[in-house]
Amino acid sequence: MRILVAAVLLLFAGALAATDAPVAAPLVENAKLATLFAQDQAARSGSDIDWAAMSKADAARREQVQAMLAAGTVRSANDYYHAAMVFQHGDTLADFRLANALATLAMQLDSGNEHYRWLAGASWDRLLMRQMQPQWYGTQYKGDARGMYLFPVASDAVSDAERTAMVGHTLAESLAHLATAASEMGLPVRNPAPTLETLREEAAAANLDH
């Protein structure tokens, strides 16, 4: 169901980009969805996070947003952005596909909004990372017992100018931010950083252990 919704949203985004129809009056935003977005963000603030409780609350928020999508009450650019962020914090490939579709639609509706562009890029990176493929924009960090690292990047997938336009920073700036991100999580920097091949081998070994 989520994959079908994502495909329809992307097709709609393309249609919006191609049309020359007059601009309609601004849509009334979904207040309940805005509240879910605020809850999603608040759950991630501070340093003393109950991860198990947050995961349960995240799942409940995704169910509510899925119902809103099915009911057609997600309509404005900000609605799509709010919905995308909720699914960005999902845990399945379908969640990340839907997050990217929603963020892309928000960006299509308002390409000048830097938050929409950032989430479109970050959701694409997370979707690639979830499939053990190199990310493009350098927004995704991972941590384990050995420390935090920037998930491997396909450095030539896009230019640094394109990265800056989409997510606001170059690849070098993403790497420079690693120490700060690790400190915020209370982790060392993993050195040397793992290659994609290493991460795939580790994932395969973990699956065998289970």
Image: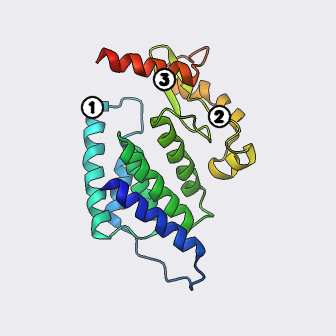
Q: Quadrant of residue 179?
A: top right
The one nearer the camera, 31 or 58, is 58
Q: Earlier in the sequence, mark 1 or mark 3?
A: 1
Give left or right: position of 180 versus 2: right
The CA span between labels 1 and 3 is 26 Å
| Residue 183, visible in the rendered structure | yes
Q: Residues within 10 Å of mark 1 (few under 14, many from 20)?
A: few
Residue at coordinates 70% horizontally, 49% vertically from top-left?
162
Q: Earlier in the sequence, mark 2 or mark 1?
A: 1
Q: Secondary structure at mark 2?
A: helix
Q: Secondary structure at mark 1?
A: helix
Kind of residue indicated by mark 1 = Ala
Q: Position of residue 154 (x, y in %)?
A: 64, 35
Q: Position of residue 84 (x, y in %)?
A: 43, 54
Tell me the number on the disc at residue 174. Answer: 2
Kind of residue indicated by mark 3 = Arg
Residue at coordinates 49% horizontally, 83% vertically from top-left?
25
Q: Which residue is mark 3?
A: 200
Tell me the number on the disc at residue 71. Answer: none
What quarter of the picture does the N terminus occupy?
Answer: bottom left
Q: Quadrant of residue 67?
A: bottom left
| Residue 77, visible in the rendered structure | no
The CA span between labels 2 and 1 is 28 Å
The one nearer the camera, 179 or 164, is 164
Kind of residue indicated by mark 2 = Ser
Tell me the number on the disc at residue 52. Answer: 1
Q: Position of residue 171 (x, y in %)?
A: 69, 36
Vertical order, 58 against 197 (above or below): below
Give left or right: position of 91 versus 185: left
Q: Residues within 10 Å of mark 3 (few under 14, many from 20)?
A: some
